[in-house]
Amino acid sequence: MGRREDKARMTRSKILTVADRMIGEHGYEDVSVDELVAACGIAKGTFYNYFESKEALIQALSQAHFADVTGKVEDYATRPPVQAVEEYLLAYMGVIVDARIGLARQWVRYIATASGSHGKWDQDRRDLSRLLDLMVKAGTLGSGLSVEGMSSFIMTQMYGIVLTWTIAESMVNPLEAVRGFSRNQLPEVMRPYLTGSGGFSTVARTSSEKTKVKQ
């Protein structure tokens, strides 16, 4: 049983690795399941044992790319709320920037055109909601916060930054745009929900040089 499970993990990992490379080289739209299984040296039925569709594969690839970020949510949640969200967003955007603008353009195209692509949006909101939920439970954010509403608002800003970067690469620095959002909008949006233990003197260090908030 152990060897069988190891083989299954290796097969799934191989599919993800090969798919990541092929999509990076050719784009999501130009990689078919038939081409992918041929490159992996597996049967088409084997692919569907692991992924019910190409969209499910893309979702799994996204989760793999962001695993380092989402895996640190509990750690981020120990920080003051505005700082926690800013650091999470910078790490999130860092993954996209590191993948380079070509993949970002493919990502935008996939989100806009692929059936079932709302799963990526839903996953991004859920991941951020988990961070907000942890801070509500810790008492650094008030229980009156609409976690779903806040996560939707924030991720809308992130998607907008990615989109504008792909349209005007020379004019937009995604990480600086995240810092600008975190400095200029995020504190005011989160202000009504900050409790005494997560008060406003704890605004993210990366933006404190331009925004000084008194206790």
Image: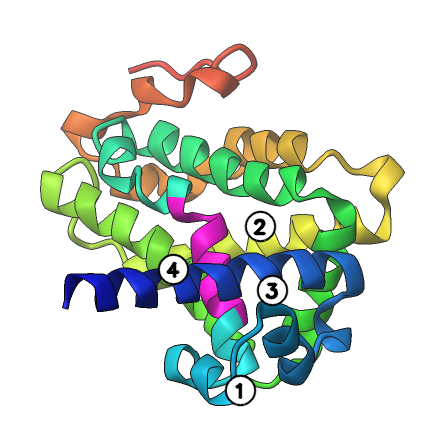
For discs 4 and 2, the disc positioned in front in the rendered view: 4
For discs 1 and 2, the disc positioned in front in the rendered view: 1
Three-letter amino acid code at the position of disc 2: Met
**At numbered mark 1, what does the secondary structure look like: helix, strand or loop?**
helix
Q: CA distance from mark 3 to mark 2?
A: 25 Å
Image disc number at residue 10: 4
Q: Are marks 4 and 2 in contact (CB under 8 Å)?
A: no
Q: Is residue 23 visible?
A: yes
Which of disc 4 and disc 1 is earlier in sequence? 4
Q: Are marks 3 and 4 in contact (CB under 8 Å)?
A: no
Circle 1 is placed at which residue position? 44
Three-letter amino acid code at the position of disc 1: Lys
**At numbered mark 2, what does the secondary structure look like: helix, strand or loop?**
helix
Q: Are marks 1 and 4 in contact (CB under 8 Å)?
A: no
Mark 3 neighbour class, 10 Å CA radius: few under 14, some 14 to 19, many 20 or more: many
Name the quadrant containing residue 151.
bottom left
Q: Left or right? Give the position of 117 relative to 200.
A: right
Which of disc 2 and disc 1 is earlier in sequence? 1
Mark 4 neighbour class, 10 Å CA radius: few under 14, some 14 to 19, many 20 or more: few
Check the image and report above or below for 197 versus 136.
above
- Kindly identify the residue that appears in the image at 11 percent across and 39 percent down: 138
Q: CA distance from mark 3 to mark 4?
A: 14 Å
For discs 3 and 4, the disc positioned in front in the rendered view: 4
Which of disc 4 and disc 3 is earlier in sequence? 4
Image disc number at residue 179: none
Mark 1 neighbour class, 10 Å CA radius: few under 14, some 14 to 19, many 20 or more: some
Residue range of the region highlighted in magenta in the rendering: 58-67
Circle 2 is placed at which residue position? 158
Image disc number at residue 19: 3
Which of disc 1 and disc 3 is earlier in sequence? 3
**Front residue (pair 55, 190):** 55
